[in-house]
Image: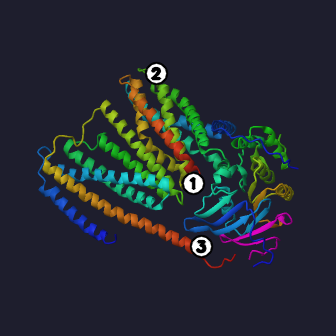
Amino acid sequence: MTQAIAPPMTEAPPTRITRATLAKDLRLEWRSKDAINSMLFFALLVVVIFSFSFDPTAEESRRIAGGLVWVAFLFAAVVALNQTWARELRNQVLDAYRVSPAPANSLFLAKVLGNFIFVAVLEALMTPLFIVFYNLRAIGPAYQLLVVAGLGTWALVVNGTFFAAISLRTRSREIMLPLLLFPISIPALLAMVEATTSILTGEFSAKFWIVLLVAYDVVFTMASLFLFELVLHAE
Amino acid sequence: MPSNTAEASLANPIISVTNLVKQFGRFAALRGVTADFGVGRLYAILGDNGAGKTTLLRSLAGLSAPTRGTVSILGTTNLRDVCSALGYMAHPSLLYDELSGMENLRYFARLYGINNDERCRQVIRSVNLDPLLERPVGQYSQGMRQRMSLARALLNDPKILLLDEPFSNVDLRSAREMTGLLARLRDQRKTIFVVTHQASLLEGFADEYVWMEAGKIASRTREFSVGAGK
Amino acid sequence: MKRAFPILAILTAGLLSYALYQALVVAPTDRLQGDVYRIIYYHVPSAWTMFTFFAINFVASIVYLIRRNLKADAVAVAAAEVGVVFNTVVLVTGPLWARPVWGIWWTWDIRLTSTLVLWLIYVSYLLLRRFSAGAQMPLLAAALAVFGALDMPLVYFSIWFFRTQHPQPVVGGGGSIDPKMLQVWMLNWLAFECFGLLVFWSRYRLEVVRREVEETQALESLLEVGNSR
């Protein structure tokens, strides 16, 4: 017999929903593990293939490594981003979210953070491999590389998550995501590559590029938050 | 026109649909549905495939914006405002296969601002499932999965329940339990819509049978008889 | 309104012919580049026309986001398509010009590179429109258009700074312009804008009619006999 007791409902603060969603996603990722494993292996493959294709001396490698690393990260990111909403589509779980009073942006932020963590893990795996294969050593301030990695990854992931949501409503979902993401990401990619190269070679200051990345991140995070609700509920 | 039509007007309809049209490109799934629905009733929505039953339910749930016309629930056409009074269930389970029942419900409860586990356990027990079951939902039988999905829809104690094919591929016993539960919820003044192909399951429980055909409501009857909608 | 179209068409034909004549025959030969430079009368006016139509697309997309007016969406797609065509012209004439004059097909020249990025963004916009179906397509496309517009200043700055760090030859450099050349330039621009407007108008009407046909077909199925209440 169902008790006719009303559930204790409070206005759910958005951050709590973001946290709960992120925790749920991490738990799901941990449980299934097949996605992580195949992606880690993919990341590894990318590094190896690149190393075969571009086999420079140590001096040259510092100049091109910035570009190589970020292109490799970009491909790994796309693979991760493409499955952002996969679990929500199975069993139509996304409908359950849409029907609830939970704000769209909480879901968005949770997905972006989840992707950020995911891609950061991939990057953390790929970086030592690149260092080994290319005998990399930073001549400029190495700590700045972390800043660049963080800002650059956020740039890819925030737009990537947004475009992944747009791609949900298209045919050829998987190709649509990179198709939309790459052109828009060009300034960010340029910044990431140039910043990384300047830090590795120590020839220029990466400051302007870091500022550009910050501006890019701010602009597109705000734009995504502004428009995500419309995209989520478009039907 | 069938002989036993339901009352034509309701004093205070909880849901009011006016000329609802839903187009997908050139295909019109709903072609002008106008109806009022009252509080504390169990409506069975019946009809052939493609009649528009699912589209109607999704429009009521706020998942599918109308092309034309309005849906008014609890006095407002802005369905986002009243979404905490709705519970929605569809043939896909709307649950995460890799999580257990409690884990699923705990998460969805958060979306409604419900932070305690007791409510989740209560609602799981009400559909005759074990809250302590650690098995992931993906390994449930269809009957169990549908019941857990119903539990999820009941988390926020909704005033209006929208169920799309809840009995599909469900064993008879689970189906009977669900119908019993729905009748009890209806007795608690909840308004319930059930889209189903198996109208016989609701015989004796439903207050009204709404027959849809080709995107419109063909008839509404108090009693169920096969072919009433034709 | 219906009569304005043929009038515009005739005017455009006249302008284009006259502008072509001016560009190829009348305008003085450049001292340094010779006659090759005349491609500038296609390259630059195309770029300016491209910007006009992309700006129209941006405004129309915003209007759609606010008002959900389908006419605004028709304006957006027509403007985008015309813009992409002119964009392609810029990208083709650029290297064609650079090769004989400066010996290289491509440098990461700020204008040419930002034009390339713009082309990529708008082609992806058109592809999104093609690959998504239904009532939500205009919304998604409008969102992408806004993203694209927000991106452009960042594109410009990033390439500008890239160029200061890695100096490369500048294609189509500055220097003073012979006033006669400027005149021909402006004339060609006007002709291109008129041509663009003509094509845009046709495309807009085509889109509006297409939507009307869809509406009518849906209405027909709405009114189909065989239903009673």
Quarter occupied by residue C103? top left
Residue A95 seen: no
Q: Where residue C85 appears, x then y in whole percent?
A: 34, 56
Q: Where residue A60 appears, x then y in whole percent?
A: 37, 27
Q: Count neighbours of disc 3 (C-alpha within 10 A) and say few if under 14, some if 14 to 19, many if 20 or more.
A: many
What chain does mark 1 sit on? A
Q: Which numbered dot is residue A142?
A: 2
What chain does mark 3 sit on? C
Q: Where residue A67 appears, x then y in whole percent?
A: 42, 33
What chain does mark 2 sit on? A
Q: Are marks 1 and 3 on the same chain?
A: no
Specify whether residue B224 is painted magenta.
yes
Mark nearest the camera among 3 and 2 is 3
Q: State if disc 3 and disc 1 touch (CB < 8 Å).
A: no
Distance between mark 3 and mark 2 Cα atoms: 67 Å
Q: Which residue is mark 1?
A: A234
> Residue A189 or C216: which is nearer the viewer?
C216
Q: Count neighbours of disc 1 (C-alpha within 10 A) and say few if under 14, some if 14 to 19, many if 20 or more.
A: some
In the image, taking residue C120 as reference, residue C35 lies left or right, namely left
Q: Count neighbours of disc 2 (C-alpha within 10 A) and say few if under 14, some if 14 to 19, many if 20 or more.
A: some
Q: Which residue is mark 3?
A: C222
Query: Which of the marked residues, 1 or 2, is nearer the chain's N terminus?
Result: 2
